[in-house]
Amino acid sequence: MRRLAIAATLLGALVLAGASASAAVPVSEDTVHDVAAQLRCVVCQSLSVADSPSETAHQMKDIIRERLAAGETPEQVKAYFVDKYGTWILLSPPRQGFNLLVWVVPFVGLGLGLVLVLIVVRRWSRRPAAPAAPPLDPAMRARIRREMAEREP
């Protein structure tokens, strides 16, 4: 009888421990959407998980929801997907190492383009006007008038 009571107590403790461990932390759909918006859909590749209509994206959102409910932070959830798929899964690459070029090169190109436009505009604005025709000497003027008079009927 005593063994039965101990077994029942242990079984009850295990059930309570399992129930408290499986008690999910309430997860905001906004948080799920925010995390999903930062991850690339593995099927659509040009869409985020939040925007993708594919079944895989829905499964990924479910994984995000489950992990957040288990108490993980959004950064830990993203780290899980990075471990599984690599940094490719992130829609915006981290600002470090070689990926820093993705963030810097567009601004450098824009700056160089603006400098080039300024140089071209300056050259155009400083370009001298078309040279005026040299003045006609009186002999040439007389010849032109004579030839014009001959052509008139």
Image: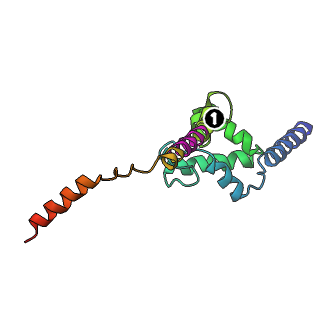
Q: Residue furthest left?
A: 153
Q: Position of residue 42 (x, y in %)?
A: 51, 42
Assess disc 1: are there few (<14), some (14-19) or many (≥20) residues with their C-alpha within 10 Å of its C-alpha: some
Q: Nearer the viewer, residue 96 or 36?
A: 96
Q: Position of residue 121 (x, y in %)?
A: 52, 48
Q: Read off the residue under disc 1.
A: 82
119 with respect to 28 (left or right): left
Residue 138 can be seen, yes or no: yes
Residue 41 can be seen, yes or no: no
Is 113 a magenta residue?
Answer: yes
Which quarter shows the C terminus?
A: bottom left
Q: Residue at x 10, y 69 (%)?
A: 152
Image mark count: 1
Q: Position of residue 59 (x, y in %)?
A: 56, 48
Residue flagged by tag 1: what amino acid is it? Val
46 with respect to 29 (left or right): left
Q: Residue furthest top?
A: 97
Q: Nearer the viewer, residue 20 or 152?
A: 152
Dominant secondary structure, magenta: helix
Q: Residue at x 71, y 54 (%)?
A: 31
Is 101 a magenta residue?
Answer: no
85 with respect to 6 (left or right): left
**Where 121 sits versus 96, above or below?**
below
Q: Residue at x 61, y 32 (%)?
A: 101
In the rendered structure, which segment of residues is drawn in magenta?
Answer: 108-120
Scheme of image coloration: rainbow
Q: Position of residue 16 (x, y in %)?
A: 84, 47
